[in-house]
Amino acid sequence: MSGVGIGKLMGFFNRCTPAPGLPACEWWVFAGYGAAFGALTLPVLALWRLKRRDQAEDVASTNRG
């Protein structure tokens, strides 16, 4: 969705009029880049957060005993 939003902004600045029923000119390009970016960052961020949580639990269990 953010990729299509960027596509709409680019269409606005390029004074492009999209075909009826389409969100933006060449929206598939921006949607593709947005999908690829999301497919890469979502797993990386999820694993990073899980790693931080495990480290916090390890520190908490060490401090208890």
Image (tube, rainbow, N blue to C red):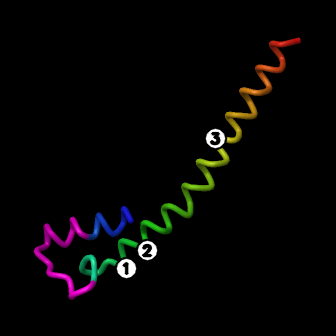
Identify the residue at image location x=72%, y=26%: 56
Q: Residues within 10 Å of mark 2 (few under 14, many from 20)?
A: few
What kind of element bears circle 1? helix
Answer whether residue 49 is magenta in the image: no
Identify the residue at image location x=77%, y=20%: 60
Quarter of the image with the N terminus in it: bottom left
The image position of residue 17, as x and y in percent, is 14, 81
Q: Which residue is mark 1?
A: 28
Marks 2 and 1 sit apart, C-alpha to C-alpha, by 6 Å
Q: Looking at the picture, does residue 29 appear above or below residue 54?
A: below
Q: Nearer the viewer, residue 64 or 44?
A: 64
Marks 2 and 3 sit apart, C-alpha to C-alpha, by 26 Å
Q: Which residue is mark 3?
A: 49
The image position of residue 36, as x and y in percent, is 50, 67
Corner quadrant of residue 52: top right
Marks 2 and 1: CB-CB under 8 Å?
yes
Magenta extent: 8-21
Q: Looking at the picture, does residue 53 appear above or below residue 21?
A: above
Which mark is first along the chain, 1 or 3?
1
Which amino acid lies under the numbered mark 3 shown in the image of this protein?
Arg
Which amino acid lies under the numbered mark 2 shown in the image of this protein?
Gly
Which mark is first along the chain, 3 or 2?
2
Q: Residue furthest left?
A: 15
Marks 2 and 3: CB-CB under 8 Å?
no
Q: Residues within 10 Å of mark 3 (few under 14, many from 20)?
A: few
The image position of residue 65, as x and y in percent, is 89, 12
Answer whether residue 14 is magenta in the image: yes
Q: Which residue is mark 2?
A: 32
What kind of element bears circle 3? helix
